[in-house]
Image (spheres, rainbow, N blue to C red):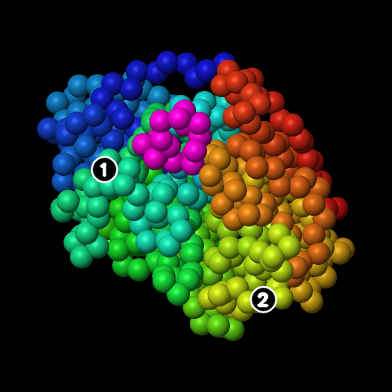
Amino acid sequence: MRAAQWDQGKLLHLLPTASHDRFLIKASFNGPLETTPELHVGNIRIRGKKNIAAADFWQFDVPRLKPATSYHLSLMDGDGRTLCEPWPLSTFPAPDAMPARFRLLIYTCAGGHDALNGSSGRPAAFLPAALRRRLLERGLSFKPDAIVANGDHVYWDLRAPRLAKTLGASPAAIAYAGSFDRAQPVFGSHNETVLRRAAGPQIVPLYGALCRSTPVFFLTDDHDYFDNDEATDEAVTFPPDAFMLNLARATRQLYYPEFLPDLGRPLGLPGASAGDRAPGAAEAFGTLRYGRLAELLLYDVRRTLTLAGPTAVFLDGNAENWLKARMAARDVIHLVNVPSNPPGWSAGKWGEWYPDILGEDGKLTTAKTKPYWQQGWLAQHDRLMAAIAAMPGRIPLIISGDLHAIAEGRMHRSGVHDFGNNPIVTVLSGPLGTGDALWPSAFRGIGASPPNHLTMEENLKPIEENGFIIADFTPEAITLKFFRFNYYRQMPDDIDRLEPFRVTELKRPS
């Protein structure tokens, strides 16, 4: 059943996030607004804040709300005229409340620009936007309480030696959007126009206002910094330089909300509490807290990456300390790690936790050195895995992004760390938008495989198909429902009837 019609009026897109006492909403309109718009939330009135000089992108920050409350929202222009149809949106339960259940929709790699797909009609690099939208609609039909979109919302790589030639630096991309000038600011220059043309068509047609009543949590990953994680003697693309960081921040400022504050997350983590963002909002490290039932730790492994050999990290030390502190705390029943880069599998690429690289026999090997890979990344991986496995009374679960596949496994060992008594459940959530050219087996010559550092039990070997996961949380268990769609074996109408092809129930340890 396709989503029912809702009158968007002048809206082009609207994406909200929520906590137990606050909403933050990003919206764009079909042209500049001549007056400041106003959001009515029940009896509360919030004036919009302009996110760009052209006055067609706005945000609405709504504090001091009641927990677990459904609000009636309406959007007006400065003269009191309706800008779109009203809609409902609910706050989450209070941090000390115990809800009976929580449902999450999660996926990765939803980006893709139809202008870069060519004219063959085949999903050369990306699933067409119309099909991605239908997959999202199907996920929403199960009425999730929240959505986690785990990285790679934008594919417009600019300098990566391999991938940029077919994406942001390709003739088709330059003809469509123009070229960025890295010596100029993003806003207030020609770069602003290029950003809109590059990023907008990857986000606005997909989401529109579909998620108006479902809080979203957008993680960033490498492509959201406008490059692929590649390292050769020609270029090492990460950590992000100033222009990459500015592009990522500009995209989030316009299109999708930051993470709202959480009492268990320090306000001073990297990318948090910036003066040009909503008070206390965070960009790289976030929390989805649903009462005492569930907490998801959301973390971007690209933004604070370092190249310091044995002391190198993906995650800033303060961020690592925050993760460990939350895993050690006992105020939440279910605590799930949601990193942008996946523990458990490797495709032999540079910016992974693991040193494995594609060997001449077509398999992963550590017999030869992966250029520019850092030993400290693996050391941090092992520290985090040990903390996850050490959580008593909890399911040690990781649901990650980046790797274009659907998979489920049990990590029994990581280096010297033995998790045999409490194996870590690690899951690949499925990519919403990947096309033929970007599956790991096509782009890298190998599908996702367990690295040599791990002892992995692959309960569901990685499947290179589009899909998503519905995760249901109750005090007793977490149930994962896996969905898949194959462009070549199924028709578009099949998306509207997708049912889970695999269901895994994870019981909470006694």
Q: Is residue 80 left or right of residue 154?
A: left
Residue under label 2, please give it.
Answer: 368
Give the secondary structure at mark 1.
helix
Residue at 87% x, 63% y is 421
Q: For the residue marked with disc 1, what is the amino acid?
A: Ala
Residue at 62% x, 42% y is 430
Give the x, y percent position of residue 416: 79, 76
Q: Eyeballing the image, is 475 above or below 376?
A: above
Residue at 79% x, 55% y is 410
Q: For the residue marked with disc 2, what is the amino acid?
A: Lys
Q: Nearer the viewer, residue 294 or 315?
A: 315
Q: Eyeballing the image, is 411 above or below 23?
A: below
Q: Are marks 2 and 1 in contact (CB under 8 Å)?
A: no
The magenta region covers 112-128
Give the secondary structure at mark 2.
loop
Q: Nearer the viewer, residue 62 or 132?
A: 132
Which quadrant does the N terminus fall into?
top right
